[in-house]
Image: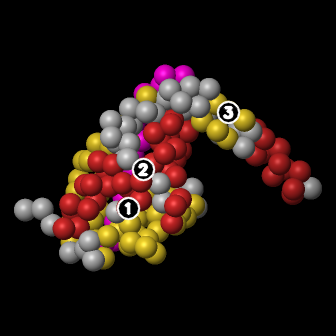
């Protein structure tokens, strides 16, 4: 049996699929004061920006697909363990410049928590495996620079 909360969340995932990519449809599922928290990155989106991450992933990996592994509904709270999958064929803009696409396959572990009120998304908290995603994009930590900076700071 599908609950209203589950139907709303499944509609959000459908709107964010590469084969569908309906950014406005994703935004329309949120309450007027709804919020999307990209928790790991420390980013919060509201209003017209609620679909920014959906558009970003669609540009990065136009074939983006969310494989839903575990889906739990407790009243108006929905928790989902999933993998965000796709092919890195779009540019990845960073503060240091653009990382050109490599065709790498992405398989990013993620946990999502959705809070539904009156049939709309009130809050969506996404915990994406950012370190896994960056590694799959070919971005490796620069430990040497960090060690140098910490040594200089300690002096």
Q: Which mark is residue 28?
A: 1
Q: Find disc 2 in the rendering and name its residue.
A: 23
- Under circle 2, the secondary element is helix
User: Callout 2: 10 Å neighbours few (<14), some, many (20+)?
Assistant: many
Q: Which mark is residue 98?
A: 3
User: Callout 3: 10 Å neighbours few (<14), some, many (20+)?
Assistant: few
Query: For the residues carrying marks 3 and 2, which lies nearer the camera in this image?
Result: 2
| C-alpha distance separating marks 3 and 2 | 23 Å
**Label whose residue precedes the other's in the sequence (3 or 1):** 1
Residue at (51, 35) in percent of width and height? 60
**Label whose residue precedes the other's in the sequence (1 or 2):** 2
- Under circle 3, the secondary element is strand
Per the rendered image, the range of residues in magenta is 102-116
Check if residue 107 falls in the magenta segment: yes
In the image, residue 126 lies at what x, y percent?
A: 43, 58
- Under circle 1, the secondary element is helix
Tell me the quarter of the image containing the N terminus: bottom left
| C-alpha distance separating marks 3 and 1 | 31 Å
In the image, residue 87 lies at what x, y percent?
A: 43, 28
Q: In terms of depth relative to the viewer, which is nearer, 31 or 92?
A: 31
Query: For the residues carrying marks 3 and 1, which lies nearer the camera in this image?
Result: 1
Q: In terms of depth relative to the viewer, which is nearer, 58 or 127?
A: 58
| Vertical arrangement, residue 112 with respect to residue 92, above or below | below
Q: From this viewpoint, is residue 116 visible?
A: yes
Residue at (21, 62) in percent of width and height? 6
Q: Find out whether the residues at labels 3 and 2 contact each other: C-beta distance under 8 Å.
A: no
Q: From this viewpoint, is residue 86 visible?
A: no
In the image, residue 84 lies at what x, y percent?
A: 38, 42
Quadrant assignment, res 92: top right
């Amino acid at each position: 049996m599908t609950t209203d909360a589950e139907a709303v969340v499944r509609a959000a995932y459908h709107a964010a699929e590469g084969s569908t990519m309906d950014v406005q449809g994703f935004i329309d599922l949120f309450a007027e004061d709804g919020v999307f928290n990209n928790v790991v990155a420390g980013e919060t989106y509201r209003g017209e920006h609620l679909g920014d991450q959906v558009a970003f992933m669609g540009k990065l990996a136009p074939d983006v697909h969310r494989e839903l592994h575990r889906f739990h509904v407790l009243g108006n709270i929905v928790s989902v363990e999933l993998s965000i999958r796709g092919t890195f064929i779009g540019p990845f803009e960073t503060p240091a410049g653009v990382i050109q696409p490599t065709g790498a396959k992405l398989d990013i572990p993620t946990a999502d928590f959705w809070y539904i009120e009156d049939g709309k998304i009130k809050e969506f908290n996404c915990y994406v495996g950012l370190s896994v995603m960056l590694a799959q994009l070919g971005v490796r930590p620069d430990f040497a620079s960090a060690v140098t900076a910490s040594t200089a700071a300690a002096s």
